[in-house]
Structure formats: structure tokens, C-alpha cells
Amino acid sequence: MRRTISFLNILLLLLLPPVVSTVSAEPLRIGSISAEYVSEVKKFKALTDYLSIHLAPFGIDQVEVVVTHSMDEMSRMIHDDKVDLFIDSPYPSLIISNQTKSKMVLRRWKKGVDQYHSVLFTRKESPIENIQGLKGKRIAFEEPFSTASYFLGKSELISNGLLPVEAPKRGSGDNKAQTADSVAYLFSGADSTTVSWVLRNRVEAGTINHHKFETLKEGIRSKLKIIHQSMDVPRHIVSFRANYPELRISQISRVLTAMDQESMGKAALKQFQKTRKFDLISTQTQNNLQQLKKMVQKINTP
């Protein structure tokens, strides 16, 4: 009898119409800006593999990386719903949030660092003691996409009533600022070059993130002094496009913030540029970011 019932049950199951899942499958598209597509996808592979497994129960059937070459191109992709989630440092994240209304939700502890700030520094023997002393002087930034080595430093100049103006190219005229309240800035191309320019007195000041300053060789650091520092900002930010469903944001955020609590997640984080964890952006940090969003509008973006 038991065999007969079992056979009948199986027969009925075969004859019944298939059950259609109420969860519609969809991809998660993570955006990143880089000139090298292959290496960028490889960089994200441990993260995307992990998310593919742990987001499957929520109906996300694949996780892919969308790489663009510029912030403008990334903004268009987010605006057109072709990118759902964007991971980058604060400056690009703020620019794109201003352009697309994307929501900055999580903080990424890239290379184990949760947050950082910019320091403005001069030579030890310089008579400049504070940011106001930079009036009429020259300062070196790294490149026009850097958060700590450009945006935060430039923001501090503006917030303190100074006018940053880009210096003319070498050979095209005087590199010094043209007005009493202005500060002429040059792009060095590398933080190490910024430090070298300050030591050689090509510029009176430079700006880099405080972690890099603290890890300079003692012989070099002893020849420099910090005259000002910016507010703290997250090392990296995870943003979601403005119209991405709140339920999806909650599900993905829950998976990301739990990664550091289990072995597979820890391994994936380590492979993802030695990320320590993801966590929610605090209220205070959100307030700081809102202030900086307004500052972005005052700065000529590249």
C-alpha cells in the first residue's frame, strides 16, 4: 500500500503544472571607474562571486561589474538604470550623487581603513603656521580626481575664505597667485612628488591623506609640519541608484555588512583589496557628506 501511495503521489506531482516562483530573477550591476576593464573586473571577482551565492535567495541571479572610463559616463549609466550600486572614494561618489541623486548608504573599509582626512603641510622651517598663511602662496595637489589629495584640501581653502586658482603651466608666466586672498595650485601627479616639491620649495605647501603623511620615512616627516586638517570622510562609499527599491537596498546591505562575521565572507573581503568590512554610514558622517555635496558644487569638477 505504501508503495502504491508513493507512486500515485509522484504521478500527481508530474501531472501538476509547475510552481512559478514569486521572486523574479534579476542581475545586480556594480559600477566602477577605471581605464582597465579586465583588471577591474578581476579586482571585484571575489566580491561578485560571494554576492552571487548569497543574494540568490533574494532573486538576484547574477552579479556583474560595469566599468566606465569617467565619472560622467558612470553618471549616465546610473541615471539610465544600467548600474545599481557604485563603489568609490568620497569625491567621485559625491559628484555622482549630485548628478544622479544616488544614495550613499555604506562605508567600505578599504585596506582596513574606515575613514581618513586630508592634511595641509609645509616645510618645518616655514613661517606659515596655519591655513590663512597660504594667502598668495602655492600649494601642490596630486590629481583632479583625488579625494584627500585634491578635493578635501581645496574644500578647506574655500571654507576658510581663500580662493584656489590653478597656476599657469611652467614657462607660461608667473606661478604665484594673482590676488591677496588666492592660493595658486599645481598638480604633481603623485603624493611622493607633492612631498618632494614642498621639500625643494617649488611650492610652499602640499596636501595628502593623513595615513600617507604618518607613514613617511622619519627623516622626511621630521622636515615637515602639518598646518591644517580636514574633516574625516569614509575611505570608500557604497551608493545605490536613486530609484533602486528600498527592499533590494536592505537585502544587499544586510549581506555586505555580515561578510566579516563568517569565514567565506572574510576571505572574499581580503581578496577584495584587503577590505576589512562594510558598515552603515553614521548620522554624523552623513551630515559631513551633505556639507561636502554642497562644496562639490563650488568646485570646478574635471
Image (tube, helix red, strand yellow):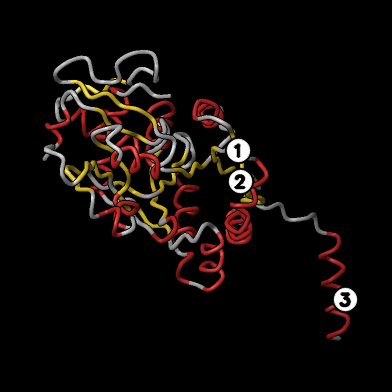
Judged by depth in the image, the label closer to the viewer, 3 or 2, is: 2
Mark pair 2, 1: CA separation? 7 Å
Dot 2 corresponds to which residue?
A: 40
Helix, strand or loop at label 2? It is: helix
Mark 2 and mark 1 in contact? Answer it, CB < 8 Å.
Answer: yes
Query: In terms of depth relative to the viewer, which is nearer, 121 or 239?
Result: 121
Question: Is tag 3's residue or tag 2's residue first in the polypeptide sequence?
Answer: 3
Tag count: 3
Residue 192 vs residue 282: left or right?
Answer: right
Question: Is tag 2's residue or tag 1's residue first in the polypeptide sequence?
Answer: 2
Mark 1 and mark 3 in contact? Answer it, CB < 8 Å.
Answer: no
Dot 1 corresponds to which residue?
A: 67
Helix, strand or loop at label 3? It is: helix
Q: Which mark is residue 7?
A: 3
Q: Which mark is residue 208?
A: none
Question: Is tag 1's residue or tag 3's residue first in the polypeptide sequence?
Answer: 3
Q: Position of residue 296 (x, y in %)?
A: 32, 28
Q: Is residue 289 above or below residue 276?
A: above
> Which residue is at 47% across, 59% downward?
275
Q: Position of residue 154 (x, y in %)?
A: 27, 31
Judged by depth in the image, the label closer to the viewer, 1 or 3, is: 1
Report whether residue 255 is seen: yes
Helix, strand or loop at label 1? It is: strand
Identified by mark 2, the residue type is Glu
Query: In terms of depth relative to the viewer, which is nearer, 120 or 100?
Result: 120
Label 2 environment density (alpha carbons within 10 Å; few <14, some 14–19, many ≥20): some
Label 3 environment density (alpha carbons within 10 Å; few <14, some 14–19, many ≥20): few
